[in-house]
Image: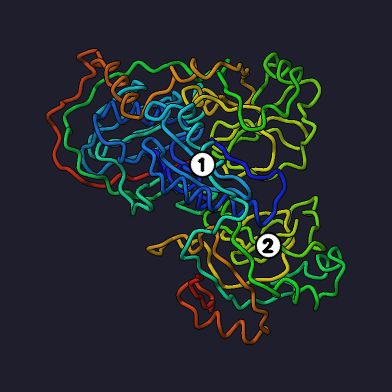
């Protein structure tokens, strides 16, 4: 069952979805097997033989009416990551200039804007652990490319539609790659394979190539030199 | 050819779809034939089999899309369990109908489980295709004499009409489009894999008024996505967890194996049914398994062909996969 808070992406609607999912989890309903969120919706998977569909619809409707979800507090224990990142370059950020042009800024200003503030992990999706980060300023409402980039590497920082996607796997994509970082959002061998949760924050920190290479050479953890703090 | 079980439910919120056997019914048939746990991983063969040997006597079961199988030249019955003796060569050829065939082994194939599953999930980068020459350990088989059984398998390898329920965006499609969708005979395009399959048809595209502006929403196997060109695409277990194309409906889990097993060019049609009727087709995994177990009977063979069933030896051992086509 899907509970949608908005047909357009806003930080408030995204926060509502995150807070609502947490509240559904807290209800601990018998028959609910899984909950998840997309950008502005909470999704509840249930066993229809244990929990009748109409009963779940009633429970979720009452919960929707229970408070103002658009201003609800986000789930606790969120983490803010600061990730050293390299922008531009033929391999590491081949479409920085093109994306900056579409956003109507210089490449230098583009980097400043993308790194200006922490961005929220609005949802994980497409590939395991892969974050959709937002929201960027309005000039970043740029479309995806019509064609596909054949393959972006793990750690690719890509932009479109006021969001950044930090790729967790190497795949073809319509998003434009502007930079790269060593942060692995999906860690197959780690005890906790998903490094991020929806509601966490990421702030990219631009570094020069030499510094970036030094950091990556030292890193064994998959954090790619990132530091983190717990929010609230 | 990949290793599969029932996949990894519970990680949609982390961006990882369930994955697992493309034809869950076929996987459960093998589990029922061998009387073992659903945790025992099997080999899923897409359209073609391969040649296999075992270093010890093992039990096998063959389910899903029927393929020509032989043990040292002796034809083996499909949808049945058999003993494969140490050193014998099991040869499995191309599917004669359907797409996904399964080779189950008593005790299951053992690899390092990830999130409680051994399923290969290629799009997530978990596991890999099985290559020629690879060796797998097998788990302990507690019922190693229990073979030569036959399961009566529901026909699902020729396409046909599948039942669907409305999905989140069904209401974005006009009544006319929904009617036309149910009347159209689709043919499965050659573009298909464990993520999903494309359907071909003649006539106008199936579009909505908001085709390109909807936000990405969660999606699951069985959802029928309408691409930007108004072409339907049915999602299978390895699909992405969210998608931005409108979905016209969702195939019932009970009928999804028909879609997964439709070969290129086979015909599929869709029919909306009401929720209560859909609910009557729904089974939990345990109930499904017990129904399958009750449809098992002894495999009757000509006594000349019977092998010495007492000639088993060890538990554990190694299965070799070789001569595996891509």
Residue, x 49% and y 17% (percent of image)?
Answer: B276
Viewer-nearest residue: A4 or A91: A4
Q: Is residue B168 left or right of residue B295?
A: right
Q: Nearer the viewer, residue B226 or B112?
A: B226
Whole-number angstrom distance, CA of label 1 to CA of label 2: 31 Å
Q: Residues within 10 Å of mark 2 (few under 14, many from 20)?
A: many
The residue depicted at 50 percent of the width and 65 percent of the height is A78
Q: Is residue A227 above or below residue A64?
A: below
Dividing the picture into quadrants, the one containing residue B108 is top left
**SS at mark 1?**
helix
> Does residue B72 appear in the picture of this structure?
no
- Lower position in the chain sequence, tag 1 or tag 2: 1
Measuring from the top left, give residue A119's x and y in whole percent.
Answer: 64, 66
Q: Nearer the viewer, residue A33 or B199?
A: A33
Residue wearing tag 2: A164
Image: A55 above or below A82: above
Looking at the rendered structure, whether the residues under marks 1 and 2 are on a common chain is answered as: yes
Q: Secondary structure at mark 2?
A: strand
Q: Chain of mark 2?
A: A
Q: Position of residue B141 (x, y in %)?
A: 20, 39
Q: Please name the residue shown 47% across and 42% down the image.
A: B19
Q: Nearer the viewer, mark 1 or mark 2?
A: 1
Q: Which x, y percent locates residue B33?
A: 28, 26
Which residue carries the number 1 mark? A63
Q: Position of residue A202 (x, y in %)?
A: 59, 69
């Amino acid at each position: 069952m899907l509970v949608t808070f908005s047909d357009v992406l806003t930080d408030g609607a995204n926060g509502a979805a995150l807070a609502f999912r947490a509240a559904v989890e807290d209800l601990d309903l018998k028959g609910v097997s899984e909950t998840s969120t997309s950008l502005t919706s909470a999704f509840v998977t249930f066993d229809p033989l244990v929990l009748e569909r109409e009963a779940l619809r009633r429970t979720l409707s009452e919960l929707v009416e229970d408070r103002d979800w658009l201003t609800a507090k986000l789930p606790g224990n969120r983490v803010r990551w600061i990730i050293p990142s390299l922008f531009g370059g033929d391999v590491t950020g081949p479409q920085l200039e093109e994306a900056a042009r579409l956003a109507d800024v210089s490449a230098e200003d583009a980097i400043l804007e993308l790194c200006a503030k922490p961005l929220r992990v609005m949802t994980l999706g497409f590939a395991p652990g892969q974050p959709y980060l937002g929201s960027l300023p309005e000039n970043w409402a740029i479309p995806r490319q019509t064609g596909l980039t054949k393959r972006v590497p793990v750690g690719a920082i890509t932009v479109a539609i006021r969001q950044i996607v930090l790729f967790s796997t190497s795949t073809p994509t319509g998003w434009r790659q502007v930079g790269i970082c060593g942060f692995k959002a999906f860690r197959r061998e780690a005890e906790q394979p998903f490094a991020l949760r929806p509601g966490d924050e990421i702030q990219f920190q631009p570094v020069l190539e030499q510094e970036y290479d030094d950091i990556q050479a030292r890193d064994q953890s998959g954090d790619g030199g990132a530091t983190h703090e717990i929010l609230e | 050819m990949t290793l599969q079980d029932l996949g990894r439910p519970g990680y949609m919120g982390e961006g990882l779809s369930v994955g697992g056997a493309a034809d869950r019914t076929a996987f459960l048939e093998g589990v029922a034939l061998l009387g073992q746990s659903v945790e025992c991983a099997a080999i899923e063969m897409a359209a073609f089999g391969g040649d296999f040997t075992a270093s010890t006597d093992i039990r096998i079961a063959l389910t899903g899309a029927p393929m020509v199988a032989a043990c040292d030249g002796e034809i083996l019955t499909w949808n049945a369990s058999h003993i494969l003796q140490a050193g014998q060569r099991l040869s499995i050829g191309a599917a004669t109908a359907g797409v996904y065939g399964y080779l189950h082994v008593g005790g299951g194939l053992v690899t390092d489980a990830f999130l409680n599953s051994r399923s290969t999930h290629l799009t997530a980068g978990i596991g890999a295709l099985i290559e020629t020459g690879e060796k797998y350990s097998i788990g302990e088989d507690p019922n190693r004499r229990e073979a030569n059984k036959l399961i009566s398998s529901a026909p699902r390898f020729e396409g046909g009409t599948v039942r669907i329920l409305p999905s989140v965006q069904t209401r974005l499609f006009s009544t006319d489009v929904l009617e036309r969708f149910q009347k159209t005979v689709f043919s499965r395009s050659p573009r298909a894999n464990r993520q999903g399959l494309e359907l071909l048809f003649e006539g106008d595209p199936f579009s909505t008024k908001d085709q390109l502006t909807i936000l990405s929403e969660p999606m699951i196997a069985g959802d029928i996505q309408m691409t930007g060109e108004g072409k339907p695409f049915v999602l299978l277990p390895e699909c992405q967890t969210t998608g931005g194309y409108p979905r016209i409906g969702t195939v019932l889990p009970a009928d999804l194996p028909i879609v997964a097993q439709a070969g290129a060019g086979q015909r599929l049609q869709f029919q909306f049914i009401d929720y209560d009727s859909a609910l009557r087709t729904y089974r939990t995994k345990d109930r499904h398994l017990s129904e399958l177990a009750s449809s098992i009977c002894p495999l009757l063979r000509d006594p000349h062909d019977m092998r010495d069933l007492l000639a088993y030896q060890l538990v554990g051992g190694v299965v070799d996969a070789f001569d595996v086509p891509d």
